[in-house]
Image (tube, coloured by chain):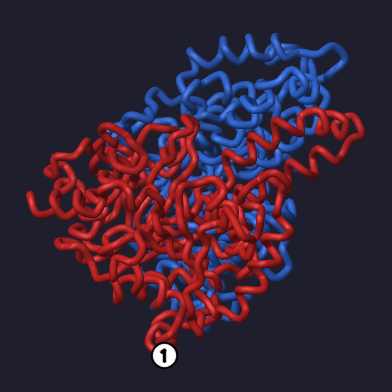
Chain colours: A red, B blue
Amino acid sequence: MPIDIVLDAMGSDKAPEPEIRGAILACRQLDVRVHLVGPEDLLRPKLREALKATARPGFSGGQGFSGKKARLPIFMVQASEWISMEDKAAQAVRSKRDSTMRVGLKMVREGRAAGFLTAGNTGAAMATAKMVLGSLAGVDRPALTAMLPTVTGQPCVLLDVGANVDCDPENLVQFAVMGHMYAKNVLHVASPRVGLLSIGEEDSKGNSLTRDTLPLLRGLGLNFIGNVEGRDLFNGRVDVVVCDGFVGNVALKTSEGLAKLVSSSLRESLKSTVTSQVGAMLSQRAFKAFKSRLDYSEYGGAPLLGVRGVCVVGHGSSNERAVMNGIRVAAEFAEASVNAGIEAKLAAR
Amino acid sequence: MPIDIVLDAMGSDKAPEPEIRGAILACRQLDVRVHLVGPEDLLRPKLREALKATARPGFSGGQGFSGKKARLPIFMVQASEWISMEDKAAQAVRSKRDSTMRVGLKMVREGRAAGFLTAGNTGAAMATAKMVLGSLAGVDRPALTAMLPTVTGQPCVLLDVGANVDCDPENLVQFAVMGHMYAKNVLHVASPRVGLLSIGEEDSKGNSLTRDTLPLLRGLGLNFIGNVEGRDLFNGRVDVVVCDGFVGNVALKTSEGLAKLVSSSLRESLKSTVTSQVGAMLSQRAFKAFKSRLDYSEYGGAPLLGVRGVCVVGHGSSNERAVMNGIRVAAEFAEASVNAGIEAKLAAR
């Protein structure tokens, strides 16, 4: 049974091309049906064009949108407005009543789709999802969740990475339950190790928020391993890390910045000698493997946990591969019973 | 005129070897005199041994500590105790009255040395420095400062990275003045761009601390560029970034963790094919250049800004090269009139 995913066609910095191409990729590789939300008169010719450009002889999906047989399961959903990166989130959510985000998320609320993906304005996506879908029972604040690469290959779930800048201990406890359920049901970690992001392992280390949160997390019945540090996000020591959205956002963007520095330094260093240019050519394949391991586009997006439905927010600079992976993430999230698990665990406290 | 630097010989994880070898390197390459603080009976034979091992024919410094001519300017200062990484900072500072840290910092207070370096327990070093040296006029809380690598090659000054976990806006204002003076006088940036670490560039983005701090930083008469994000730490957009010590510590350790992941991924990816093994050998030189650019040991340590004197804290895993660079940092810090500048600027507000 294919899973229905609604895709905001007007979200990314270069929309709608990455979305359209990502939808095509997803329909060719995954068992999904993609509902592209946006202005139909703009999207329809672009979709036709992209299908032609990506058509491969002998590949049934390549017959094109208007071909007679083996159509790709891509559908159009009309929305006349969209929220840009420059729009103020709160204002745009109120004023743009026919936005791609609102129309798409309504389809999730009404059960016409199992999940929603946007690579657009994160603040607007969160606000719209909270408004349209509402929060799960027992959840005060939904949280944005990032998957970080680790040495083991198993991603580390970090939340919140920006939905809630000022948090109290109860928020962090709810984040721990949400992250635990996601790691268990979507990433298939049998007993996810949960950590509290702090500045030292000892209980005494941290700020007033982490010190107040620590005993609550201990009493939760999860596999809680105590305080963890920034370096533990990548070393495979922990599966789920909770923190307030300000700290999580700084950690996430710091890693993105360093990853960029690494790429550019590496490129420059390799260019600097003729010997190493030859070396670089020979080790090209290895570099690709390395880059794909650190590349956010392999992870596809940040699930918004705690809302009554499935909403995934991708990076604004998403390319077609990132969009496809975002669709995969939304589909896997929708298939796993994460939300029911969160409500049950929070009710049982 | 050589500059006198006191070096805690018992600080690093592998003390005293990296300290002794680092002192030898520094005396051979820099215009410094190094005062090694620690138990003399333990240090003296190890120094003699290290001098023999590192002696190079034809190199005057290689004659050895006990040689007749061209002695290296390394001196012993007796201290019977030292604070370990496992010691609780506050307690150790009180109970170990003859610790290497206390003895060394006293030499700075008494003007017998221009600066102090330790690769030991950061908390203990900060507490001892505050107690022995005291704070500069106008400074409520000294701050630990990290130098991060950027695409331009000019480091980005980040503070606080762990001295103060809960800060108020006035603390951050003082950090901005301290970071400005350090970038200007030690790193020779004519008009350092100062930024406030937040989660978006707009004034409205951030938590209650950053929103309250923003107008104060605007009124300070520095080259303040507003909110910056985690990624800006590495892209050369800003020279000095201020934040509370919790957030700064998370950002610093997150970068360290990612840098480690990068190294290990790269190594693994390169090993994975024979072709790339050949490639890796050829591009070895380039990798070295790349690594040294990201390597903390090139930066040598974190200056503690705001105390009445010069105190630099190195990484516990410092090798001899990191120790030498730490001595260089302490000497450069001591030569520049950073502290007088901080007091003048804070008094003029």
Q: Is residue B237 above or below residue B328?
A: below
Residue labelled with disc 1 = A95
Q: Position of residue B135 (x, y in %)?
A: 43, 58
The subunit letter for the residue under badge 1 reads A
Q: Position of residue A169 (x, y in %)?
A: 20, 57
B69 or A308: which is nearer to us? A308
Label 1 neighbourhood size at 10 Å, few (<14), some (14-19), many (20+)?
A: few
SS for callout 1: helix
A83 or B264: which is nearer to us? A83
Outermost residue toward the left? A348
Kindly identify the residue that appears in the image at 45 percent across and 53 percent down: A32
Q: Is residue B336 above or below residue A192?
A: below
Kindly identify the residue that appears in the image at 54 percent across and 52 percent down: A26
Q: Position of residue B235 (x, y in %)?
A: 66, 58
Q: Is residue B300 above or below residue A24?
A: above
Q: Amino acid at mark 1?
A: Ser
Q: Is residue B243 visible?
A: no
Image quadrant where residue B55 sits: top right
Quarter placement of the N terminus of chain B? top right
B279 sits to left or right of B226: right
How many numbered marks, from 0 up? Answer: 1
Q: Is residue B117 visible?
A: yes
Kindly identify the residue that appears in the image at 41 percent across and 38 percent down: A232
Outermost residue toward the bottom? A95
Q: Position of residue A15 (x, y in %)?
A: 61, 70
Outermost residue toward the right? A274
A18 sits to left or right of A79: right
Kindly identify the residue that appears in the image at 38 percent across and 54 percent down: A145
Q: Is residue A155 above or below residue A327?
A: above
